[in-house]
Image (cartoon, rainbow, N blue to C red):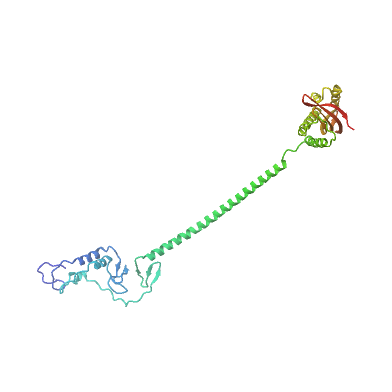
Amino acid sequence: MEYEEGTPFCSNCGGDLVTKKEPKPAQEDNKKEGKAKPDGRLICPKCHILYEKLTSCIRCGAPLVTQAALKQMRESPPPPSPEGEKPEAEVARPSEVKKEPPPLPPPQKPSVEHRGGELKQAYGFDIIQEPSLAEAAEKGLEKELAEGKREKPFRLEKRKKSFFYSLHGILSIILLLMVGIYILITQFLTAKRVGPETPTPTKIMEHAEEKSAVITKEASPNVPSSSLPVVLLPQEIQKLLDLLENVRQANLKKNINLLMSCYSSDYKDFEERRRTALQSWSKYNYLDLEYVLKVESVSIDSARARVEWLIRSIPVIGGQTEEGRSALNVVFQKENNKWKIQEVTQAR
């Protein structure tokens, strides 16, 4: 309590009064810290352990202070107070008397359990320590493991999907290759099967006739002095074959003009040959005619050969197909540089 100047003693307790002095900066800071209490946690100045509910350290028994006060004590320790004088803060006043806490039992080593960076003691209160780098690393590792566990099923599913897609892609490629190979083989076999155009029976007979003509020519013992050179022989034989082909087409198509153009102008019984052809066509339809030419001799303007005809015909009035063979000895003569039939006789 404060009294006016001149009062000798306290009216309540009867004690002597002293002059009020200004509190020192450290005490003012302590009062301010005590009033403001920006941080509810207290720290032991010796052990540096944080507390929330106690007033003294359970390890060393030292009174707890705020973190700001501890920092100020480290930076600038308070100056020593003069002897014989006690600061006003230390004078016991009835209104500011604090009850001392009951004596604590002797300190024992509490059982401490480590659980994820927090220390839990048997007394029921928490000792909070500032997290260290190891704890932060451990927490980060636990977080990464948790995220990895979440991502693992997704990655596994993604891997399965990619394998499934890749398997389908491989099968598709194999199928396409098989189809392509099958198409190539089919085309190759088809082309090989078709091959070059198969010659008609008439052309086959022509080749046979050429061979027989050449053989006959070589086997001929007497060659006229006016015979053709060997180099020109194939060309002349081909012209004879062309003449016989015109005779064949004229009989198949019943073209009298084409037929008579194949005979020489001095052919014996020229008009009789015309009449005979027309009568034959009126009775029969020629289905096919094939011939074989066997050349016996060739000169510049004449040639001798044996011609065999294979005839297949059917009557005009209807009936069965008839087949026949005719062997003729033919003499050819050139007119206007073209081969013509000059004489025809029945071969024996």
Please state the total of marks drawn on the protein image.
0
Question: Residue 329's quadrant in the figure?
Answer: top right
Residue at 17% x, 69% y is 88
Residue 60 relative to residue 166: left or right = left
Of 32 and 118, nearer the camera is: 118
Question: Residue 200's quadrant in the figure?
Answer: top right
Vertical comparison of 123 with 247: above or below: below
Vertical comparison of 324 with 16: above or below: above
Picture coordinates of residue 18, whole percent (x, y): 13, 71
Q: Residue furthest bottom?
A: 106
Of 42 and 287, nearer the camera is: 287
Residue at 78% x, 26% y is 338
Q: Is residue 319 visible?
A: no
Picture coordinates of residue 163, whole percent (x, y): 56, 55
Residue 40 relative to residue 208: left or right = left
Residue 149 relative to residue 233: left or right = left
Picture coordinates of residue 210, whole percent (x, y): 79, 35
